[in-house]
Image (tube, coloured by chain):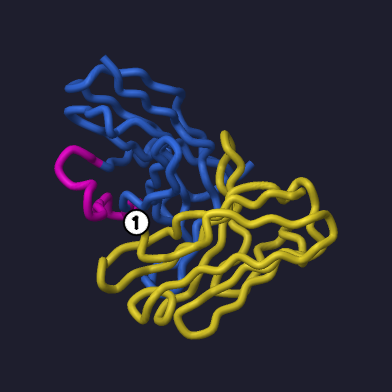
Amino acid sequence: QVQLVQSGSELEKPGASLKVSCKASGYTFTTYAIDWVRQAPGQGLEWMGWINTGSGNPTYAQGFTGRFVFSLDTSVSTAYLQINNLKADDTGVYYCARRIGVSSRDWRFDLWGRGTLVTVSS
Amino acid sequence: QSVLTQPPSASGTPGQRVTISCSGSSSNVGANTVNWFQHLPGTAPKLLIYYDNQRPSGVPDRFSGSKSGTSASLAISGLQSEDEADYYCATWDASLNGRVFGGGTKLTVL
């Protein structure tokens, strides 16, 4: 079954770090990029960036540089999102998505994880 | 604020046709293909339309996409209660050098 399975909800204090996982199954993991998308409470979807699953090279969107780290473990077909020095504003649901299409012009997110709720609160 | 403008809400009665707009600029919608996603809270977003007007297999032909210049639209015909969800457009923005989503439109089926 082709799917992306994300890790469960997280509750952390400000200043801590956490790591969200996104495990792919049913397809060759290194064939397609993995993008990350955030939805803050009451807000819309926001693109965070992506990781090249072949090379491991990450690209971060504006606003997601510094504290956010994308990584891979291709041996277990899993992508990770690490958030360091957590802030209350990081609260939200984080989604991973498989992207088809390497050009900036023509692409699509055809497969999504169900999301991981991250709550940052003291 | 997103660079892609969608109406915050839309509504229709069962059987009706509704259209959701996505207005952008020459650096995004005008130059790149548009995707549309359906999102119900607590679930994974679902791809409805890609490459402006292509439907993935399994998406009913009640859903259609179009684009003219710097504006794209999603049309839903034969509205059904299960269509009640949030809808997002997305594309690449050359000025931001990244992918962008519209602010989302909450569709209510009356």
Q: Answer with the quarter of the image where residue A54 lies.
A: bottom left
Question: What residue type is disc 1 on?
Answer: Gln
With A44 as the anchor, is A72 left or right in this view? Answer: left
Residue under label 1, please give it: B1
Which chain appears yellow? Answer: B
Which chain appears blue? Answer: A
Q: Give the range drawn in magenta.
A: A50-69
Residue at 46%, 23% (x, y): give it: A8
Q: Can residue A59 be seen in this view?
A: no
With B59 as the anchor, is A109 left or right in this view? Answer: left
Above-or-below relation of B101 to A19: below
Q: What element carries label 1?
A: loop
A41 part of magenta stretch: no
Q: Where is residue B105 in the image (x, y as percent from the top left)?
A: 55, 55
Above-or-below relation of B16 to A2: below
Q: Nearer the viewer, residue A58 or B110?
A: B110
Q: Where is residue B109 in the image (x, y as percent from the top left)?
A: 74, 50
Q: Answer with the quarter of the image where residue A66 lies.
A: top left
